[in-house]
Image (cartoon, helix red, strand yellow):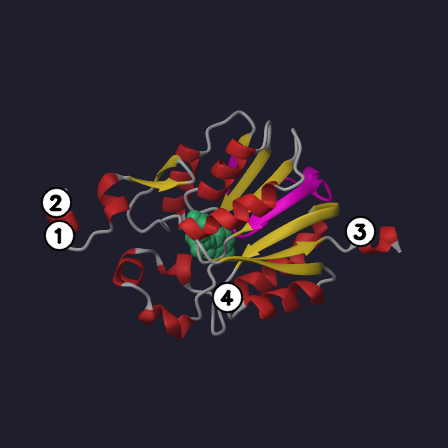
Amino acid sequence: MITRRVSGDPLEYVLGWAEFRGLRIAVEPTVFVPRTRSGLLVEQAAVGLGPGAVAIDLCCGSGAIGAALAATVDDLELYATELDPAAVRCARRNLTGPRQTVLAGDLFDPLPDRLRGRVDVIVANLPYVPTEQIALMPREAREHEARIALDGGPDGLDLQRRAAAAAPGWLRPGGRILIETGRRQAPYTAEILARNGFRTMISTDDEIDGTAVIGIHPDVQRDTR
Ligand SMILES: C[S@@+](CC[C@H](N)C(=O)[O-])C[C@H]1O[C@@H](n2cnc3c(N)ncnc32)[C@H](O)[C@@H]1O
C-alpha cells in the first residue's frame, strides 16, 4: 500500500474507500472520488424532505451523495443512475438499502416511467470541467479518475444542459434539482435552468468550497400565480 501511495496512487484507491459526510464509501480505481464540497448538495437537497420522499442521484459515481442523503432523510426512496460500469459496481456496493436502486445507463434513460412527475429532488454532480481545463487539474484527478467523470465539454456545461432539459419531466410540481457547479460557472448553470423554466438560486459554502445551483420546478410558479 505504501509503495502504491508513494508512486502516486490516490489514497482512496489504495484504501478502497473514501470518507464522505461520516460514511465510508467504497471506491475502486478510476471511479470519481467523492469531494467534501459535494456535502453542500446533500445539505441543500435534504431541506424540506420528509420520510418517503423520492430522490434521484443523477450520474451517481460511487453513490456517495445519494448514500449521504439517505442517511439524512428517513425512508428515502432513492434511484441512482450512472453510465460507467466501474462506478455502477461501486454504487451497488454503497447503496444497498431496501429502498435504494442503482441503474446503469445514460442520465435519466434507465429510470422507470412510473417515476415521471413524482420525484421530489434530483441531486446532480455531473462532470463540469471544461475539456481544456482537465490538463490543469491536480494529478490525482487528471491521471487517475476516468475522463468521463470530469469532462463537461468545451464550456463544462454540456451534461448540465442535457439534464436541465429532461428534469422537468421527472419532477413533481415544486420538486427541485440541485446541480453542483464551479463558482464562476454558477451564473451560467442558473441560466441553463432558467431557460428550462426553473426558478433558480445559487447556494455557496466557502468553508468547503461548495457551489450548488438550485432549480425549482416550473409548475410551482404556475400554481402560485
Ligand atoms: C463528477 S463525477 C460525480 C460522481 C458522483 N455524483 C459524486 O459526486 O461522487 C460525474 C459522474 O458522472 C458519470 N457520467 C458521465 N456521463 C454520464 C452520462 N451521460 N450518464 C450517466 N452518468 C454519466 C461519470 O461516470 C461520473 O461517475
Q: Are marks 2 and 1 in contact (CB under 8 Å)?
A: yes
In the rendered image, the residue lying farthest to the front is 207
Amino acid type assigned to the residue bearing label 1 in the image? Val
The outermost residue toward the right is: 225
Give the left or right position of residue 131, taking residue 109 as reference: left
Q: Residue at x 59, y 47 (%)?
A: 44
In the rendered image, the quadrant that contains the C terminus is: bottom right
Residue with the mark numbered 3: 220
Name the outermost residue toward the top: 98
Q: Is residue 23 above or below residue 150?
A: above
From the viewer's perspective, tell me whether residue 170 is left or right of residue 15: right
Range drawn in magenta: 101-123
Residue 69's spot in the image, x, y percent?
53, 38
Q: Amino acid at mark 3?
A: Val
Q: Position of residue 42 (x, y in %)?
A: 53, 44
Labels 1 and 4: the sequence-earlier one:
1
Secondary element at tag 2 = helix
Q: Please indicate whether residue 64 sits to the left or right of residue 200 in the image.
A: left
Q: Is residue 26 left or right of residue 218?
A: left
Query: What residue is rendered at 28% in x and 45% in y?
Result: 12
Answer with mark 4 or mark 3, whichever residue precedes in sequence: 4
Q: Secondary structure at mark 3?
A: helix
Give the residue pinned by disc 2.
2
| Marks 2 and 1, how far apart at CA | 6 Å
Q: Nearer the viewer, residue 85 or 213?
A: 213
